[in-house]
Amino acid sequence: MTLRGPVVAGLLTLASLAGTGVSQAGVAAPQALPAGCTGNSPITCHYAVAPGRYDLTVSVGGASAGQTELWVEARRLMLPVTSTAAGSVSTYTFTVDVRQPEGQPTGQGGTGTPGLDLRFTGSAPQVSAVSVRPATQPLVAYLAGDSTVCDQPAAPYTGWGQMMTPAVRAGAVVANYADSGESSGSFLSNPALFPALISKVRAGDAVYIQFGHNDKQTSASVYRGNLTSMITQVRAKGGVPVLVTPPVRRIFDGTRLTATALHVNGVGVDLPAEMRAVGAAQRVPVVDLTARSRALLESLGPAASAALYLRSSVDGVTDNTHFSQYGASRMAGLVLQSIREQGLPLASSLR
């Protein structure tokens, strides 16, 4: 995302991004909504564009004070809650991936509507201008993974891939092809998933690959073979593969996570260890999200770590695999931190 204002230094957090941008104090914003937009809380906008990548510029603010958050397509967060003073406007630019279906590639949870959809939420959402233009050859970061990564269409379920998007500057874009229930093998073979993704990869694009949650009975040799096949195909297109070990489940034995939580599967395969070995053998960088998420959960402990996942008291369901919006944002932060530290593809395009 490009903000027309001071650059935020260091690792992006949702709190650090909110409220930044250009403020034009004392300039009364137009009262009418931009073309294509309706409603007041939320404000929704629709643009009948073909699948592709688009530069989206929005100006939030208006005559009265505002609190505005922007989501696009299938619940991809672009702008965390941002405050604007009465009579001021802040302008932001993003690059957005538009596809059909707009969320999970197999259409799980719904296919959405063709075109580009925006949703301005918050306690007092305001939008004074919207511009949509075709993007010119943006860097694309593709995501290949399962339900912990994907664009989850309905709250409270949230994938970390749909929460990393606020960190990405205009000129680069996240294309999230992760899909619920997929193993390394099913993702590789389904025409709507890896074959569709790889057909679009251009030289220099990155493909971040996370599997493990659904490889419950996958042998070590098959798992390594599936990952190696993806790596080989990405490289053949001139892309840059990056492996991401799966985030942990919240299953404690005392104050430590169990082997199941750490993705030792039903046939005794330590999947993160196998992925690290493939990375070393193939000279592919690895984002060790297993280790990073383990450190986070064990530092929080069994009680406090519950907020990262779905809780019956808050979400109506207890689920120690899938993330709350808060948990997905924390996992996205861990991935972004590793991308920065290793100088991986996308690092130069992050705020």
Image: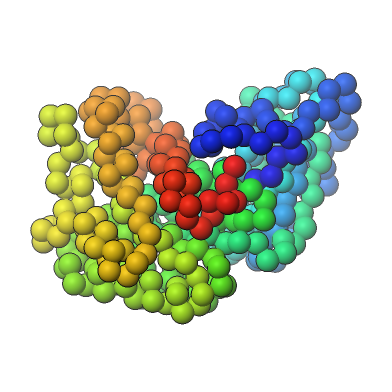
**Residue at left offset 89%, top offset 26%:** 27
Residue 329 relative to residue 254: left or right: right
Q: Position of residue 199 (x, y in %)?
A: 52, 76
Q: Quadrant of the C terminus?
A: top right
The one nearer the camera, 314 or 351, is: 351
Residue 203 relative to residue 104: left or right: right
The quarter of the displayed image where residue 81 is located:
top right
Residue 342 relative to residue 34: left or right: left
The quarter of the displayed image where residue 43 is located:
top right
Looking at the image, can residue 331 be seen?
yes
Q: Position of residue 337 (x, y in %)?
A: 44, 42
Counting every numbered tag in the picture gives: 0
**Residue at left offset 34%, top offset 26%:** 313
**Residue at left offset 24%, top offset 63%:** 277
When the figure is inspected, residue 219 is found, relative to residue 62, above or below; the finding is: below
When the figure is inspected, residue 246 is found, relative to residue 67, above or below; the finding is: below
The image's colouring method is rainbow
Q: Position of residue 318 (x, y in %)?
A: 29, 36
**Residue at left offset 77%, top offset 32%:** 22
Looking at the image, can residue 181 be seen?
no
Q: Position of residue 90 (x, y in %)?
A: 76, 33
When the figure is inspected, residue 164 is found, relative to residue 90, above or below; the finding is: below
